[in-house]
Image (cartoon, coloured by chain):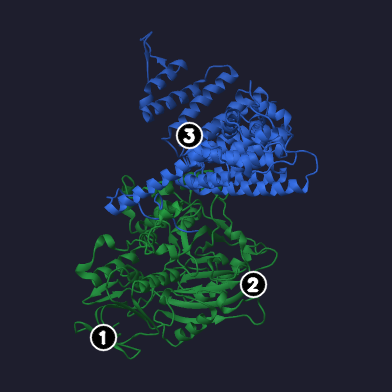
Amino acid sequence: MESLTDTLWDVVICGTGLQQSLLALALSRSDKKVLHIDPNDFYGDAEAAFSLQEVESWVEKVEAGKEGLFRAASVEKPEGDTGLSFPRAYSLALAPQLIHARSTLLSQLVSSRAYRQVEFLAVGSFSIFKPSPDPSQNPTLVRIPSTREDVFSTTAISAKAKRGLMKFLKFVLDYDSTPQTDTWQPHADAPLAEFLLKEFKMDEELQTYIITLTLSLDGKINTRDGLAVIRRHLSSMGMYGPGFAALYPKWGGLSEIAQVSCRASAVGGAVYMLGTGVKMMNDQEDPIVVELTSGDTIKTRKVVRSNEGATDESSINRLVAVVGSSLKSLFESTVEGAPTPAVAIVAFPAGSLSTTAGEASQSPVYLSVHSGDTGECPANQSILYFTTVSEPTSQDLLQRALYSFLAAVAGETVPQCLYKLQYKQLRSSLQSQPNGLIFDFAPPASSLAFDDSTLQSVHDAWKMVLGDDAVEEEYLTFTDREGAMDDDEIYD
Amino acid sequence: MVLKQGGSQHGIARTSRVRTEAQKQQDLERIQKYRDLESHLRKLVSASDYSCDTFDLTTKLLKLNPEYYTAWNVRRRTLISGLFSRRSDGSSCWRGCSSSSRCDTTTTCSAASLSSSLTRILPSRAYQTTGRSGTTADQDVSDAATPNDTTTPTPEDEESQKKDSEIIKSELFFTIPLLLESPKCYWIWSYRLWILGQSVLLLPVPIAKKIWQEELGLASKMLAKDCRNFHAWGYRRHVVSRLESKELGGESLVESEFAYTDRMIRGDLSNFSAWHSRSKLIPRLLNERVAGEKERKGFLDAELNQIREALNVGPEDQSLWYYHQFLIDNLVSPVGRPTIVPTLTVEERVMYLTNEITEIKDLLEDYKDVKLIYEALLEYTLGLCQLIERKPEEDERQDLISWVKKLKELDPMRMGRWIDLERDSGLTELLPGWSGQPKHY
């Protein structure tokens, strides 16, 4: 077997984030020589999932300026015996994204057979946080209706408003045909909220329901994008079973997909080196000469990496809290025959929270609640992932969101917070693009739901690496390695 | 939950493939193996050999071809002839025939009738041991002890019950993968029902009841997968009626079945079978609740409110209008059927109907082109007039004319029907100066 330095690699992939890992999966049945490296000593990069110990060493690296997109990370643990379990009982996800049933990612995981290694859980209810008008009363969570049956069952909307909502849901399901296009295209770039008011006479409450379904981070999504996302949600409903529109991979969300992809790639012959990065690269030569931090110098035809250069000024703030309660009431399925959901989404619309100083929130806060079924924490606990667009008051606001949420779900006692992780993640409007013999992946989007446009870059990278050897029909379309079940077994 | 690819076996889509010579050879070998198994079975049957070997042979054959009904029959016979334990009094556990007479339901107990016809045709070893031959089914019933004997079970009995229970469980388990592969194969269902029937005859009531309760769970699972499967609803009703029968304790399940229709409707409003089931359960439900007039009125109000809420979000759905119509009929023409509130006066009925018409008119505000709304309004308004025994008043007449006009527009295929309706309801107008020539709108 050739050594690292003697081999002429077909591609060196830097970073084991989701995009790079999907690329590795796509190349796993080609006979190309793939070297996949990651300067971290863990898989997943910006989409990794951590045990509590790994969180703490990651926080240290972030504070030392060594983790690219991340800033201002800190951990808070109350003193004493809180009921926090041992560190490896937890798997905190940096990218707790839900995947809509209709997403191309799922069909690609199926066609590439990688789906067999992933366990998917159902994402259940979407709710809105309602502050209580009376300070002596607890705030409440109101479920957002997104199907005809939801609208039928809810008691929170008037009969007339229900009819309006039904009209809109029907409109969206067919929004890309005439005459619907005539109605919305003039408003394509205007905020969706405006469109809902003008064309469907929706009051603010209904508008909030719809905007929340889009999971728009700043709440200002435009009509074109908003309608597309809502249609994806509605048409995903019931696709893999009754009562849910989105899935979540067990054991840490996208991190699990990245790991499964790398595993498949390794089985296909790729060489993996964690804790190894690129020290220097001479891309003026062909083949490219790369000096690794391990001291080895290698030659490769192509390089694929992440572009972590310039990023926008905008970022998101995240708060991850471990809570000492299973929060069962959030994970009840109301639909007969539906699987028990493991994830529930709660939105805090702009204005529903106020800072300690009394200012109302300007942007929505989103919360993804994960039960122990996700494998991310013990069964009698839950993980809360809060996200909001960064503003000066964001850290404070996320803390307020945490305590307001716990007040809303409190039963006999208010659930305790056992562990808190906070950080900032920079966002980028950079595009993925080829650059001669190098392909740069754009930094991952920090959206709440997986965005299929990510997959286009993976496909582009695959085409660049394989060049003329690329066979379109074989892109992420494989047969099982083990071979089909032998029918002859039942004859014996 | 694991992602499944639909419609293919082993995750690979079925495509017509060209067989290589090697594959052809493989297929020929498989065919030969099957034929060998089959001829072996025939040999054993003709030698009246219904031993364990025969049983195993049917297992192999049925896995390959669950539609081979003779193999199912042979399997049944091997169980009856030996694998199912005998009672300590030596009589056969062969009560297959009696189960058909105990069936309270009108649904077919096809499995039972199948097995009873078997005894009439074929002599079984069981008969030989009791010294009888060629006895008819009925005689067997009167001669045999009932399965729920009040005599204390002997240790032998308990042993044999345990064995039978295991056999029943494993047989039910055996049918599952076959049903998953061939869910519409009657022979498998027939066998399953027969085994379930055997549980009532051979096992103590609590155990048999549990088995049937699990079967109800299976029916629920099937309906969860396809909530409008007419056969699955029929199967469910059969299972419910067995659970409610005297042999299994005679407990009424009407409340839980009513709650079940509730859940199914919340899952999918368009579930005609669920609404239909609901309507059938109501009379018994109210009787069991010993509902007085007040409770009955409350119940009717709740049902009307609920169906109106459903129509509010789904006015184009026929199954919802059928249920609404069922409730209205119940109100308006109570003669000859069990009604929800039999004590309503005519004034009260008129009030209900008038109210419904007003509520439905509200729907027109936002649903202008849904023909079922206009149809309902027409029918109920004409029905109201009939109830009070008067002709439509002028404003009603104008409404009726405009609704028929709308129906002609929305449903021109049924033009003839709308024209007839107009004429029969006296809605056509005579223009001045055109006597005898009605003008149609």
Amino acid type, label 3: Gln
**Front-lying residue, B228 or B167:** B167
Q: Position of residue A432 (x, y in %)?
A: 29, 71
Q: Residue at x 49, y 55 (%)?
A: A244
Is B107 rendered above or below residue B392? below
Shown colour of chain B: blue
The residue pinned by badge 3 equals B318
Residue B229 appears in the figure: no
Colour-to-chain, green: A
Q: Chain of mark 1?
A: A
Discs 1 and 2 lie in a common subunit: yes
Is residue B370 depicted above or below B161 in this figure?
A: above
3D distance between C-alphas at marks 1 and 3: 73 Å
Label 3 element class: helix
Residue A366, given in percent of the width and then of the height, sits at 50, 66
Disc 1 designates what residue?
A: A6
Q: Nearer the viewer, residue B145 or B204?
A: B145
Of callouts 1 and 2, which one flags the residue occurring earlier in the amino acid sequence? 1
| Side (left or right) of B217 relative to A111 | right
Using the rendered view, name the quadrant where residue A5 is placed.
bottom left
Q: Quadrant of the N terminus of chain A?
A: bottom left
* Element on which disc 2 rests: loop
Identify the residue at horizontal 42%, vertical 72% (top origin): A259
Residue, disc 2: A416
Query: How far apart are the two marked residues, 1 and 2, measured between alpha carbons?
Result: 57 Å
Relative depth, front residue between A379 and A321:
A379
Task: Residue A68: give its label.
Answer: none
Three-letter residue code for mark 1: Asp
From where the camera sits, is residue A344 visible? Answer: yes
Q: Are marks 1 and 3 on the same chain?
A: no
